[in-house]
Amino acid sequence: MRIICWGTILGILCWATGVTADCPVADELARTKGLSAALSAYLGCAVNQNDDESQLYLAHVYMTGQENVAQNRQRALLFYHLSAENGNATAMVELARLLIELDNDDKTRGEITSYLEKIQGQFQNNFENSFKGELLHPYALLMLANEAPESKWFYLSRQKSDSRSAQLLKNYQIDAAKKKQVMRTATLWKQRKMVDMAREVFSVSEFNDFYRTLYPETGLPNAFTRAQAVEKLKSRIESR
């Protein structure tokens, strides 16, 4: 997995459990010395290794507050966001729930705006990865989480489903025009994730060919050659 350069993101991190992390060193530190002693190691897995399970775990820690780690919804929002960007379905559901909760209260709605200002400032000049700090609409997050796991073969995360998403999606009230816009945004998000994975597994020349097939300079992509390119990407990912 690519090590992503996060710039000065650690400045954001220093604003001063059914969920597990895939971070053996941190897990051992937490077991022997406690969560606060393992926090830096978990941050290393979440940030430097871009591990979605560690990101989700830290989001849960900061959302609930555990041991000597204080509750912090801004940090929880950050790590739910990063994990959801990797396609983690549970993170998508939790992020949607948190955004809905914050937006429904006049006193907390500003936390979303404040977060976006900070996070987008960190990523606006980062060309190593397509993540720029945008937040998907809660309905889009729930819709993506509810899609069939087999259609998510190009997601980084192994956590490709969350059973809560179907009911939350069913109960979500959204007007037709907004729903159409949100669905378009979700489709573009999935296309971006596919391109990210192509950049990850293909050589430079293979990636350029793949990208030109999906996004020709003129006209529309050829359906047959596009399907071939996507199938090649899928085979390459599955063979890793």
Image: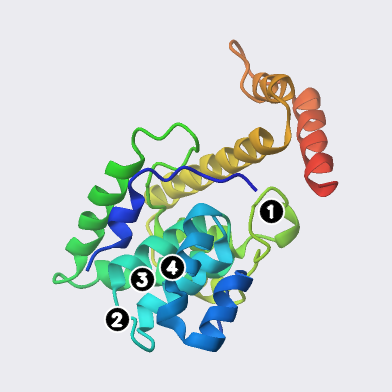
> Counting residues from the N terminus, which is met first, the one under dot 2 or under dot 3?
2
Q: Amino acid at mark 4?
A: Ser
Q: Nearer the viewer, mark 4 or mark 1?
A: 4
As drawn, the label of residue 98 is 3
Q: Earlier in the sequence, mark 1 or mark 3?
A: 3
Left or right, 1 with reference to 228 = left
Q: Nearer the N terminus, badge 4 or badge 2?
A: 4
- Which residue is identified by label 4? 40
Q: How many numbered badges does the structure rendering display?
A: 4
Q: Residue at x 36, y 76 (%)?
A: 62
Provide the secondary structure element on which disc 1 rests: helix
Q: Amino acid at mark 1?
A: Lys
Mark 2 secondary-structure assignment? loop
Whole-number angstrom distance, CA of label 4 to CA of label 2:
15 Å
Task: Compute the Cα span from label 3 to label 4.
Answer: 25 Å
CB atoms at circles 2 and 3 under 8 Å apart? no
Considering only order in the chain, which callout, 1 or 4, is on the residue closer to the N terminus? 4
Give, as a three-letter code, the residue at label 2: Ala
Residue linked to disc 1: 152
The residue lying toward the viewer, choosing from 39 and 74, is 39
Tag in front: 4 or 2: 4
Measured in 3D between alpha carbons, the distance from the residue under mark 1 to the one under mark 2, in whole angstroms, is 34 Å
Identify the mark nearer the N-term, 3 or 4: 4
Q: Earlier in the sequence, mark 1 or mark 2?
A: 2
Q: Is residue 236 left or right of residue 171?
A: right
For label 2, the residue is: 70
Q: Position of residue 77 (x, y in %)?
A: 36, 65
